Image (cartoon, helix red, strand yellow):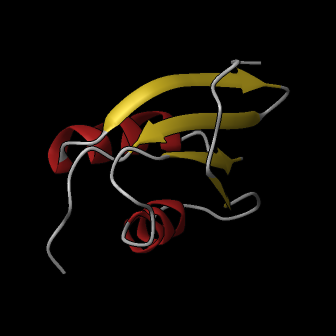
């Protein structure tokens, strides 16, 4: 498990594309710039979708890992996003 300190957690376990990224898009608005959000997911498509989300919106993907079908993404919010 990554040793990245987190400020908030988004649990999307049991949800499938596109729900995890839709929830992430909504949740990241509530995170302060510079804070880290941990996203937990069970949908394998998040391995593709979460990094693309970060790249597209300019957030920093600090780490990602998978353990027994649980995917974790540590995202530092680096910019405000428009609604």
Instruction: Classify 82 as above or below 31.
Output: below
76 vs 10, nearest the viewer:
76
Residue name at image x 30 percent, y 48 percent: 53
Q: Left or right: where does residue 60 sit relative to residue 35?
A: left
Q: Please tell me how many numbered marks the rendered image carries.
A: 0
Which residue in the rendered view is the most extreme toward the right?
68
Looking at the picture, how far across and down is residue 56, in whole percent? Answer: 16, 46
> Quadrant of the rendered structure where residue 82 is?
bottom left
Looking at the picture, how far across and down is residue 77, in whole percent? Answer: 35, 47
Residue name at image x 18 percent, y 43 percent: 58
Residue name at image x 71 percent, y 47 percent: 42
Q: Left or right: where does residue 78 sit relative to residue 75?
A: left
Looking at the picture, how far across and down is residue 36, in whole percent? Answer: 51, 43
24 vs 79, nearest the viewer:
79
Q: Left or right: where does residue 68 sit relative to residue 65?
A: right
Residue name at image x 56 percent, y 36 percent: 73
Q: Quadrant of the C terminus?
A: bottom left
> Quadrant of the rendered structure where residue 75 is?
top left
Q: Quadrant of the N terminus?
A: top right
């Amino acid at each position: 498990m990554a040793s990245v300190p987190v400020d908030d957690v988004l649990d999307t376990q049991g949800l499938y594309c596109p729900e995890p990224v839709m929830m992430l898009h909504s949740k990241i608005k509530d995170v302060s710039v510079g804070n880290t959000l941990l996203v937990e997911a069970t949908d394998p498509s998040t391995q593709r979708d979460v990094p693309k989300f970060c790249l597209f919106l300019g957030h920093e993907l600090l780490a990602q890992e998978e353990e027994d079908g649980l995917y974790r993404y540590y995202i530092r919010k680096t910019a405000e996003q428009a609604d």
